[in-house]
Image (tube, grey):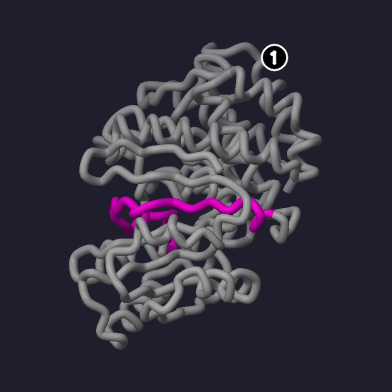
Amino acid sequence: MKTLNVDLGPRSYSIFIGQGLLGHAELFDAGLAGNQVMVVSNETVAPLYLQSLRQTLGDRDVRVLILPDGEQFKTLDEVAKILDALVGARFARDCTLVALGGGVVGDMAGFAAACYQRGVAHIQVPTTLLSQVDSSVGGKTGVNHPQGKNMIGAFHQPACVIADTDTLDSLPDREFRAGLGEVIKYGLLWDEDFFAWLEDRMPELLARDHNCLTRLIYRSCEIKAEMVSADETEDGIRALLNLGHTFGHAIEAGLGFGTWLHGEAVAAGLCLAADLSARLGRIDRSDVERVERLVASASLPIRAPGELSAERMLELMAVDKKIKDGRLRVVLLGAIGKADLDSDFDRRALEETLQECRDAA
């Protein structure tokens, strides 16, 4: 087992990464606030891992809420079900929510924990690659709005994150590959050596080699923990983690949430961000080709969907959370492993990227 610390003063917590961690009661004991526990999972994950988790939680007062599976269910209505269950069970402020599932479950359970009685404890138990490397860490919680991704939410840090890599064995190939989109992002914005390691090790990663996966998850979480510790509420450096996301969120909203997986949309967004960076003279075209090769090697899309016009993409990007003073801010590349946030760029270059980096309609 590997352990990382997210240093946030009184809100600091540990990330545990390894095999068989669902059975480690001592990890859960350290994060549980009291005897009352609400496990939130979904229809796909619960049949696989709920029984094991309940055994680990022992004789506590454990209630379970099973939600439908899918990004299209990441809504206020589903969060209301969690809150109704907490009120119905008469859970007190020393209760703990345990999110057993992927990013959708984690975001909704975390948001419910942020809202219930003005904030109760929660533990993230991510079961997808994307949630283990990204969404379970950092305290971003919330739901989607029909016009935009994650437009409603709160920062609410977990008591701990328990990433059992054995759960990745049951992950469908498409979801596993989607998680690699977020992983590639980390190398691209922060660590060229990690990016190069991904280029070399992609066959082993796709074969789900556990040693490679543990290193991949650890390094991804290490980068995110460093950035979150420096900028908890995304007022500065943490915004770089949105590389590819302004494009990706527009794709998700434009197609309808759940049509493309989040990691698929982010992967295409990374390629669009690289293309725009090249058009602005920030990187060489050879760097764009390198990004596209790595993304394609993970069997992820390198273009935006053809059914979304450049005009429609611009409309959707205009409601992005990174708008400031009426100006769109986009994370751009200065090199492989280096990124910065920019709002003062040539809009014509953005329009060219959106027009030319699309699949045939």
Name the quadrant of the N terminus: top right
- Picture layout, residue 342 above or below residue 2: above
Residue at point 24%, 35% (across, down): 325
Image location of residue 261, percent across then percent down = 62, 54
Residue at point 28%, 41% (across, down): 233
Magenta region includes residue 144:
yes
Q: Nearer the viewer, residue 60 or 315?
A: 60
SS label for mark 1: helix
- Residue 69 figure quarter: bottom right
Q: Nearer the viewer, residue 216 or 83?
A: 216
Q: Is residue 335 left or right of residue 357?
A: left
Q: Magenta part of the protein: which range?
A: 141-168
- Residue 301 figure quarter: top right
Q: Can residue 254 be seen at all in this image of the molecule? A: no
Give the overall secondary structure of the magenta segment.
strand
Magenta region includes residue 99:
no
Q: Can residue 130 be seen at all in this image of the molecule? A: yes
- Picture layout, residue 217 above or below residue 335: below
- Picture layout, residue 229 above or below residue 281: below
Residue at point 71%, 61% (across, down): 170
State how many labels appear: 1
Image location of residue 58, percent across then percent down = 45, 74
